[in-house]
Amino acid sequence: MSIPLLDLKAQYLTIKNEIDQAIQNVLDSSIFIMGPEMKTLEKEIAAYCGTKDAVAVANGTDALILTLKAFGIGPGDEVITTPFTFFASAETIAQVGATPVFVDIDPVTLNMDLTLLEKKITPQTKAIIAVHIFGQMLDVEKIMEIAARHNIKVIEDAAQAIGAEYRGKKAGSIAHASTFSFFPTKNLGAYGDGGMIVTNDEDLATQLRMLRFHGCKIKYYHDEIGYNSRLDEMQAAILRVKLRYLDRWNEGRRERAKVYDQLLADASVQLPGRDPLALPIYHLYVLRSEERNILMERLKAGGVASAVYYPVPLHLQKAFHTLGYKVGDFPVAEQACEQALAIPCYPELSLDQQRQIVALIKH
Ligand SMILES: *Cc1c(COP(=O)(O)O)cnc(C)c1O
């Protein structure tokens, strides 16, 4: 029996009746765009995160682009982020015409190293995108303090961290604005694309609602150049069902992470590094090994899927060659790219399966 990295079919089967009903309800209403499901989901996500408002958009990438746009960020501006993340965290900075500036990561948590952050702030710096990598938050309050001294904006890219906490505060609740992705494999995943921005700034939310809908407040009256970036009713209805299970599922991931921690304590791999102030949601359970590729092959031969997050740090991506970075600029991120390996970690994974995976890792 092979073990996938994530089992979305197994998850669906546990909530099939509710999902099928939710989809049927949308079909019966035949309201497909900007309807009651989306509006209710916005309220529910805002309540879940403890923010004043939430604005649904088409995906997590658009959530970042619209937020950067709403903050007036563009050509000539710099935005600081981590080189160890999914491409969109920095692609979106370039997409609005600004320049991504990278800060190396902490070797334990693999999140941005905050001791290196302030040195990278220049008069051109307009924002910091703080990424909660693999579902473990970094200290956004500390970033807010640093940002306040320089009068710059902070955005949490919480695509991998919905439900995670830091000092008891939810991911997305601390920065000026925060973004989520509902890509199917995220902890709260749609059955298609989806995204959300949460914020306590009501003017910003109004601005974002205009941007996602062609710069309109009133239909066919366009106050500015915007986008078409909406979350459809089908996805919103599915997400509303899944949101009710999110805490349980995140807890299920934490339980499985704990099992791995115990069973792998004496294995010759490095376990995921923890910040004691963070409550992670294990979007991914990521081991590190100097023999990563051999380990991956061994798992594959034993029928276990694993995946490299991420094979190339962003500063060395071809698309960013014009930024002029070279090998050795961010050594911690580069090493993480050589060593990191995600193994299956989700609530539907059984203890037997975990034992089978551990046996392969231990060889
Ligand atoms: C998934 C992800 C995104 C992009 O989300 P999409 O919905 O796929 O556009 C952005 N940042 C991070 C860190 C992600 O993991």
Image: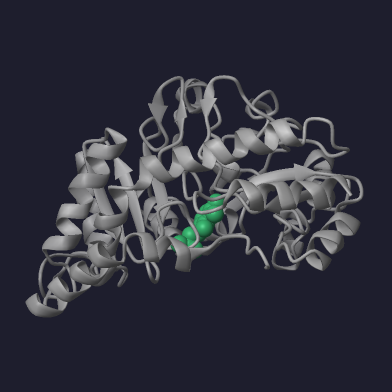
* Residue at the (73%, 30%) spot, across then down: 108
Q: In this image, 31 relative to 3: left or right?
A: left
Among the 4 quarters of the image, the one containing residue 237: bottom left
| Left-right relation of 143 to 69 | right
Is residue 1 shown above or below 88? below
Residue shown at 13% from the left, 72% from the top: 25
Which of these two is toward me, 243 or 41?
A: 243
Instruction: State how many labels appear.
Output: 0
- Residue 146: x and y, percent? 53, 23
Q: Is residue 117 above or below residue 349?
A: above
Choose between 143 and 168: the one closer to the eye: 168
Name the residue at 45% across, 35% down. 164
| Image quadrant assignment for residue 82 | top right
Q: Identify the image's colour scheme: rainbow, by chain, secondary structure or one colour.
A: one colour
Residue 78: x and y in percent read 57, 46
Q: Is residue 194 above or below residue 188?
A: below
Furthest toward the front, the residue is 352
Residue 336 lies left or right of residue 261; in this view the side is right
Q: Position of residue 258 (x, y in %)?
A: 61, 33
Q: Is residue 51 visible?
A: yes
Looking at the picture, tell me which residue is in the foreground, 226 or 263: 263
- Asked whether, in this view, residue 224 is left or right of residue 271, the answer is left
The answer, for residue 124, to whether it is visible in the render is no
Residue 130 position in % (x across, y down): 53, 39
Quadrant assignment, res 111: top right
Q: Quadrant of the N terminus?
A: bottom right
